[in-house]
Amino acid sequence: MQVEQFKNLIDSKLGVGTVLSIDENTTPTAIVVAANQIAPVCQVLKDHPETLFDLLSCLTAIDNGPEANTMEVIYNLYSIPLEHALTLKVFIPRDQVEIETVSHLWKTADWHEREAYDLFGIKFMNHPDLRRILMPADWEGHPMRKDYVEPETYRGMKTIREEDDPI
Amino acid sequence: MSQEIEYKYRPENLNESAPNVHTEANLSREEMVINIGPQHPSTHGVLRLEVVTDGEIVVNVVPHLGYLHRCFEKHAESVSMNGVIPFVDRMDYVGAMNSEHAYAMGVERMLGIQDKIPKRVEYIRVLVAELNRIASHFVAIGTYGLDIGAFTPFLWVMRDREHILRLLEWVSGARMLYNYIWIGGLYYDLPVGFEEKCAEFISYLKPKLKELDEVLMNNKIFIERTANVGVIPRNLAINYGVTGPILRGSGLRLDYRKVDGYSVYPELDFDVPIGSGAMGQTGDCWDRTWVRVEEVNQSVKIIEQCLTKLTGDHKRTREFDPRELVPKKIRPKAQDLYVRAENPKGELGYYFRVDGRSDVAVRCKARGCSFSNLSILPAISKGHMIADLIAIVGSLDFVMGEVDR
């Protein structure tokens, strides 16, 4: 299926305006979806017999920085039976980083979303178990954000090595 | 000059940084929490398992990760793209060549030079990647045997793996973390005489694989310990994003070397083994291990074909320069790209975003195969004995360096 067909399918199922645009500059080609519609869109793409995206390969979050004031969540989908791939992109405002979870559709999203929450602070609503996964539970801040400032100490240990420090 | 590290010790530090999910309050009678790891040998690295048990039956497992988190993605945002390759090595440190291959492939696609890479370079890449795949599977099979009480196969595969590591050391100068496959080419051509030594190794290895098959895979104790244990149904595996030998063990013939046909894999003849439930149910621990053993045989087949090509059609010449296409300045056009490849453990993917203004990626997310493969552990180990939990953990064959990145 071509990206236009994916767009038409989603628009016909969920109403025109669900797909905001097509991003040809991404490989595999991406469609940008309205942030509040991500869970229904994924449901359609997973279950529809012409799409059958049964594998969520990767879930990426990107912080565009305070100037652009947006964050992105990117879903790489792959259909094993039909052998086609698609990228979904969602833009969310930086001052309210909330998005619906897709972990009820693909269980693999569970840990990927936890990682995105841990490193970017994106809150996945209705996620069953949204805890930090890589950083310690009492770490302050979300390290992959562009405006992240590393705390100087963690439990009294210096986090930044000084040049003259022999260790 | 050295200062005392002022670590503020309080007894509750540990519990605050990685608290247990289960507390006494939400356990029922007869249940108790057992902590396995992070320094337990059967967890293959630094994985901590919080196990809720009822007698000897596992009620729930909660994996705690992050003990080996080294900020790969943060590094990839501050180091130029060719400088990231050593960091890539350190993710899956027993299959570093494969990770490098996938990474180099991604950047080459962004630069648009993927079709210009000389065939000899591609064959050398596949050759070293498959050698490394054998080494990685040997670690998986050997330590798995060790986990469940078979000591001899571990010593045998480690002996054979040593030959591979020495070959790769001869090629690149390092035993495990190579930095050999570069963007656009290779560090060096193969050393003179490598092809002959490698062929010699392959003829040495073939009878050893038969031995391994007899002593481990058809061993009655091993079969009884692994058959019907930790069965992963195919749909569950896909839902959890499990790929690689585990998914193939569950009976799905999905191999990106065949599906995507990247590098020179379409020119090579090899099979994709899948589990069939020969000793129990499809997708049990035995099937997964069998798939790995069988993949070693297939890799041997690939290596033989590569060696034929490297001494025939694409043989060493005085003019051949593996660095010919290595770009002086890496500056891909602004774009996003997801690249994936078949690693020894499954689908390794990189999501790149470059802005076209510098040689440092804006974002480079690594989708580690071990990360997704490990996430299925709680779903398949409920109701098993604790001893079987160890067998399941071993059969998933994850490397914590790639889980935590």
Image (spheres, rainbow, N blue to C red):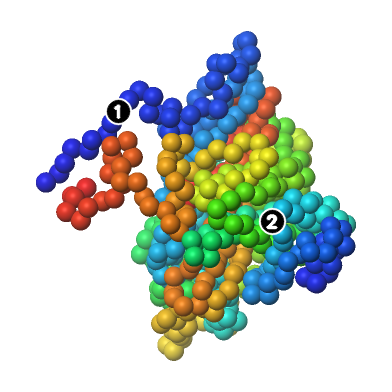
Q: Residue furthest left?
A: B1
Give the camera-side residue of B144 and B254. B254
Q: Is residue B283 left or right of residue B19?
A: right
Whether callout 1 and callout 2 share a subunit is answered: no
Give the camera-side residue of A72 and B6. A72
The secondary element bearing badge 2 is classed as helix
Task: Name the residue: 23% across, 35% down.
Answer: B6
Q: Residue furthest front?
A: A95
Q: Residue furthest bottom?
A: B319
Q: Is residue B50 left or right of residue B197?
A: right
Q: Which mark, residue B9?
A: 1
The secondary element bearing badge 1 is classed as loop
Residue B160 horizontal/vertical position (percent) = 48, 51
Query: Is residue B273 positioned above or below B379 on the image?
Result: below
Three-letter code for the amino acid on which mark 2 is drawn: Ala
- From the image, tell me which residue sits under label 2: A35
Task: Name the residue: 49% across, 43% down.
Answer: A134
Tell me if I can see residue A37 in this picture. yes
Task: Name the residue: 11% across, 46% down.
Answer: B1
Give the camera-side residue of B237 and B10. B10
The chain identifier of the residue carrying mark 2 reads A
Please report contact status of discs 1 and 2: CB closer than 8 Å, yes or no. no
Q: Is residue A51 left or right of residue B95?
A: right
Q: Which mark, residue B404?
A: none
